[in-house]
Amino acid sequence: MLQNWLRRTTKIYKGWENFATNFKQCCGLATDLIVDYIQHISDTSPFKLSKGYGVNLMLQQLFLVLTECVAQPMEIISRLGCACIRHTVMSAGEYLTDEMWDIVCYNLRRCCRVSLCSVKQLMVCFHVESDNFYGDIGEVKVAARRDYTIQESERLRQLSHQVFLLDCQQGSNIILKSTCVEDDERSFTFLLFPPNYSSSDPDSSVLRVPFCSLVVSLLSHQILLQTLGSILLQGTKYMLPTLMSLLPAESSMPSSLNGTKKPGFLSRLSNKQLCILFKCLDESYKTACDFDARPGLKFLVQKVAQTNVAANLYKQAGVSWTIQMVTIFEMCMSSEDLSLDCIKKILLNKINLSEAPDNKNTDEGKVENESTLINGNTNEFLMLRQKFKDICETYTEHTIDKEGLPTIADRMSDQPIFFLATPADDMSESLFPSKQNESDKHQNENNIDLSSQTCYDSSDSEDLPNLKKGDSKDKIYTLATEDTINSLISEYKKRKNHHSMPSKSNEKVSRKLSSSSKPQSSDDLLPEDIVMQRRNSIMKDGEAQLQVFKQLIQSFLDLHQSLPDCHFKAYLPVFFPGVQFLVAYTTDGELRIALSEWLQRLAMCCDFYVDPRTVK
């Protein structure tokens, strides 16, 4: 019933404005019912719960509905799905059997993949390190549609800043509202044209990714990361700065979890289930890094989101990396033997095994090694060592590449850009079909899968109300830089001598240029000191990236130094390879101070540090 209600309302233009409240209540009550039923059976009939009579099916069907909720481009419904998933896991987690935890972990994995679908579809069109914002594979255009209210447009802009900017960048990201009401009422859709595009059948070849779907799905992914953090680390005593905003205070934890040796539900999860959750975190981190390695895509999203700096997913990368690292550290700390000799022996055995001829320099061997990393405490130390070394290497690589030079994204973000309407053709009609064409299309949409639902533009399913005949509200835009505009103006001047009056196409371009250039001169309305203050307060993309990686490294160096001397000495083989890279290449003052403190602690722990102040 809930699934049919969800799918039916999605096909109605702005249908959630009328049904969202009722659906939220119904979905919440269904979630509460299943949680209460699991708790009741656990108290009255533990045998029935262990056999999974009907309970496993109920839990599986609930997660299927909640996964579809997460996939919706509507913020209120997508966040509802994330909230119900969190409530189910955190409230009934201590009663779940091993089979139920399998269901939870597999569905969390599915939710994470669904929430990353939109950004992955965009990344396919762009090559790594490419500054081409038109797309390297095929072509990317931006379609605008006047179907938003000013409040909806402003809310989406706020969410996009929350997703694509760091907290320090959001505070300095002052965006002046457009003086054109038409600009505030537009929604944007990325049109992904394949390399061999044929205009004969655009519906089957052009992929549409609404900007709203992109923002809402990434926002939901952030909420899912919070749920993963709570499952793995709620109650941990190693509260790194990145985890402060994710996990509740220890006093707000359920009393049943405070006495456990491991935080969260780590003691209840099997090695197989941990592997599934770690794959979620790995995919989140890799997707964020892949997005940030495409300056052209970052620049395109920046202009649609109306931010002063290049869009980034550094926050997502930092959160996913920290959750996984602290979880591995917790698993290492639960080992029975934490002596230096034991850890050295473990690392030597595993490193020799990973460097065997069968696994050396092969992706297949690397994947196999990753899949078997959690077979016991003997492998967590190798994971911790490798991941810390990797992020230190990544930081030093970025430091060497960017020292003294602005990044590609920084150079592009300072470049003004305009949205130019393409020549009038049948593209608008074919990409946004009429109600009659849509009704024929909906008859074959019963078996649509989740991945396609994430990119489904519900605003296209029906005509806009109160639309006058012949009033075109759909426009497709191409991106134009200053060079493009200068070439257009020069071409116009050449032809002006041959024509006493400009043609219709020139009039259209001229009007578009004049209307698009208005927001660019908004700085003239502000005092010069305000403009300079705003420019100086903006953290550039390259600086932000280095800052995030530096904070992650510093937090783990501090965590290592917070350990007792015996444990600090035992973990030296784990952290030393990464520190070695930092000592050789880092030039950042704060990080060099942190390394100096770490080396001082090393000298004191190994008893070769002499403080001149104590020598008489």
Image (cartoon, rainbow, N blue to C red):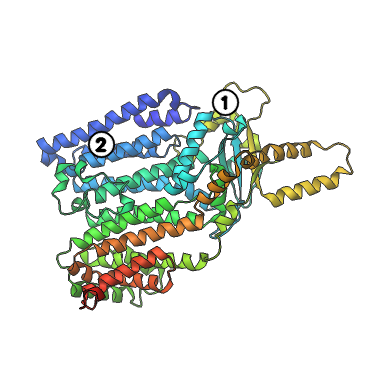
In the displayed structure image, the side of residue 456 where residue 130 appears, left or right: right
Q: Residue furthest front?
A: 616
Give the image quarter of residue 40.
Answer: top left
Please state the horizontal and vertical placement of residue 249, each as a whole percent of the image: 24, 44
Q: Tell me the quadrant of the picture where the C terminus can be found.
A: bottom left
* Label annotation for residue 464: 1
What residue is drawn where x is 84% and y is 48%? Answer: 494
Crowding near the residue tagged with mark 1, few <14, some 14–19, many ≥20 C-alpha atoms within 10 Å: some
Please state the horizontal and vertical placement of residue 334, each as a whole percent of the image: 18, 60
* Nearer to us in this view, 36 or 594: 594
Say what amino acid the circle numbered 2 marks: Met
What residue is drawn where x is 21% and y is 40%? Answer: 92
Mark 1 and mark 2 residues within 8 Å of each other at the beta carbon: no
* Nearer to us in this view, 396 or 136: 396
Say what amino acid the circle numbered 1 marks: Leu
Please state the horizontal and vertical placement of residue 582, each as a whole percent of the image: 39, 70
Residue 137 showing in the rendered view: no
In the displayed structure image, the side of residue 252 where residue 505 appears, left or right: right
What residue is drawn where x is 46% and y is 55%? Answer: 544
In the displayed structure image, the side of residue 371 where residue 162 appears, left or right: right
Please state the horizontal and vertical placement of residue 209, each as a whole percent of the image: 53, 42
Crowding near the residue tagged with mark 2, few <14, some 14–19, many ≥20 C-alpha atoms within 10 Å: few
* Nearer to us in this view, 38 or 587: 587
The residues tagged by marks 1 and 2 sit, at their Cα atoms, a distance apart of 39 Å
* Label annotation for residue 58: 2
Q: Tell me the quadrant of the picture where the N terminus can be found.
A: top left
Q: Which of marks 1 and 2 is in front?
A: 1
* Nearer to us in this view, 534 or 478: 534
